[in-house]
Image: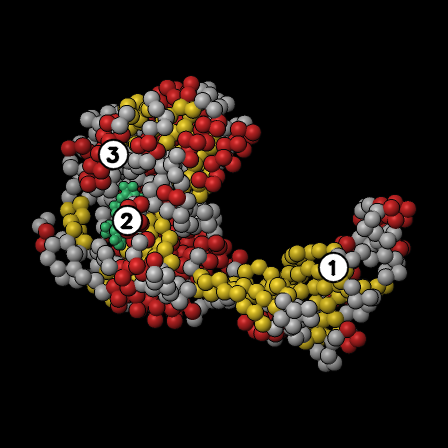
Amino acid sequence: MSTSQIGVVPSFIAGQWQTPEAAGGTEVLDANTGELITIVTGGKLDIAAAVAYGRGVGQRELSSLSLHERALKLKELAMYLNERRKDLYEVSYKTGATKIDSMVDIDGGIGVLFTFSSKGRRELPNSNVIIDGTAEPLSKDGSFLGSHIYTAISGVVVQVNAFNFPVWGMLEKFAPAFIAGVPTIVKPATPTGYLTEVAVRMIIESGILPEGSLQLISGSARDLMDHLDYRDMFSFTGSAATASRLKSHPNVIDGGVRFSAETDSLNAAILGPDAVEGTAEFDAFVKVVVTEMTSKAGQKCTAIRRNIVPAAQVDAVIAAVGKRIEERVVLGDPRVEGVTMGALASVEQMHDVRAAVQDMIDAGGELGFGNLDAPVVRVAPERDALATGGAFMSPLVLRWADSRNPILHSCEAFGPVCSVVGYDSVDEAIELAAMGAGSLVATVCTNDPAAMRTLTLGIAAHHGRVHILNRETAGSTTGHGSPVPHLVHGGPGRAGGGEELGGIRSVKHHMQRTAVQGSPNMLTALTGVWHTGAAQQLAGSEKFGAQPGNVHPFRKSLAELKIGDGLASDLRQVNQQEITAFANETGDTFYAHVNPKAAEANPFFPGTVAHGYLLVSWAAGLFVEPAPGPVLANYGLENLRFITPVAAGDSVRVTLTAKKITPRVTDAYGEVAWDAILHNQNDEIVATYDVLTLVEKEDTTYAN
Ligand code: NDP
């Protein structure tokens, strides 16, 4: 095919697909065959328009949805992409990825969407405001409170990604930004951005996302940062050198662009002193090392670069790793049956990796396994992979006479390459791991809990994640190199200092935390969550605050129920017979409830007292409205605290107030959290908690 027939990878800016005309551009080749597959334009892209569109249309459309509605859209999108995985796989092979590599990239990316969708709906309110922590009383009379809220940042997030995970790399950043309500402008790396473009095209064609929530820049776009200010965020993945250049841009230093980076990392795996050859841990270690060397041909920011093993185990580890590579690795075009390791992303990348290895050899490293000049693994026979101009490279293991050689701890050969070094003590292993100057992840492989604890606590401050491996997890681990959406992905120091993932924490990275101060009524109106001291519309006992004519809140569907609706009960007296009966009935005959002498000797109790669970049960009896109605179920209690003991002769009453109402986007009901507070006859607080119920959106009781 001539260059003129080859398409240019388009961008999606301001709702339009665009391919700016320009001479030249960067030719992108099939990593396995060297065939020209596409061109990335050198033409000027209108970044200012993309930023303006995101800040305007994107922000407006996203903010018209709640956190839950956006989370639900991620699930829809995940299901849509799931059905089109095959098409993505076909393109993915061209990047050198095997089927398993593509699963990590494509299925892994879709998995992130599913996880964030469900975590977003489970852990966040169905609103656009997230409350952080509990309110702080700032005045004696309770009329002035302080709290913290999170709201979406008001600009865009620009996501610049590395070449190694064209789909996952985009989706792992997009999911939390989208839930937060922040429009994304994604700029994939030139060598594999054509796969990102296919995924973005699918996403746009799905029509699931609100307009302006996702834009794509296909091109070098070196002026991206020039268009951003303090409203925006820049989330970078790639080399430390580029991160450092971007971080020193005046718009970051003076302009306040939020900058997060995930860069090179000299990740370590430490074999514990107990994990000698022949143990299950030794075998698990070797397995994980080979997986990390060969999956994505070692082009993973999380791959193990330094294996730190007991000095006496160095030879055994190198031999076992080499043996497993020889047994398992078949190098070649991933489209050929039986191939287990594909090409690097580009010939340039392969040259960079080989040059890095040569530098390490020149500085004192020795090849313990493999050969720079000829492959030592099987090569796919159907096609002479190595003669095709593909970016193939056989795995290499380096050994070191000097375990503190600086290059070993600083040079990242971003391919199927790792080093093995020996240590003499656990303290030395910790020191060696820390010489990576901040890493994304380390594996600690030992079956000795004491060694594990010393190693993990010793290295934790230098790492974003520690993967503890032993015989119990060898078969169930998600792997050293696989970031999971629930946990932090990022690391200190050289790893960039950012955190891309980490559950709901990463949604909040895209939000501003603001302290708010005001009256309980104002904070209730602001957050949609009832604050102690705010107005209540209580049914029940007028003696304890109910207003005449109010309907019991359990008779109200979500359509009728308002924050602050509630019930005040009358007092109920407690006697010892009831306490004793409850003790005998349940078997909870703890002395404080049934043995007056022993109870009196306890400094916390005036004598025998009612069980906490008895009080909670009485409270339910005091607030319940027993007839069938819109309340469907009680699914739990939260934050239960017993504060003042209740003795025979005392009385208790309950006040229940609708605190938080969360209609479920997908169901005919929602969740209501009720603030429950028990008082005694002296108005002292006996217990506090939240009662969690499911309530119908519309009352269907009488429709049946
Ligand atoms: P780069 O840092 O060169 O590129 C990463 C991304 O940044 C690409 O999308 C690139 O775009 C973009 N970029 C580069 N310069 C700028 C700029 N001035 N403004 C905006 N965007 C910019 O890294 P590479 O992908 O070339 O990989 C080089 C090394 O980075 C690897 O050898 C490895 O050490 C490390 N790396 C780390 C990864 C990680 O996940 N932590 C992943 C991959 C690589 P373009 O491609 O168009 O130049």
- SS state under label 2: helix
Amino acid, disc 3: Ala
- Left or right: where 490 falls relative to 86: right
Q: Is residue 671 left or right of residue 21?
A: right
| Mark 3 or mark 2, earlier in chain | 2
Q: Residue at x 46, y 58 (%)?
A: 508
**Circle on res. 242:** 2
Disc 3 within 8 angstroms of ligand 1 (CB): no
- The residue depicted at 27 percent of the width and 61 percent of the height is 226
Q: Is residue 596 visible?
A: yes
Quadrant location of residue 438? top left
Measured as percent of width and height from the top left, residue 661 is found at 58, 67
Q: Earlier in the sequence, mark 1 or mark 3?
A: 3
**Helix or strand or loop: what does disc 3 sit on?**
helix
What amino acid is found at the position of numbered circle 2 in the picture? Thr
- CB-based contact (under 8 Å), mark 3 and mark 2: no
For mark 1, what is the residue? 687
Q: Which residue is mark 3?
A: 356
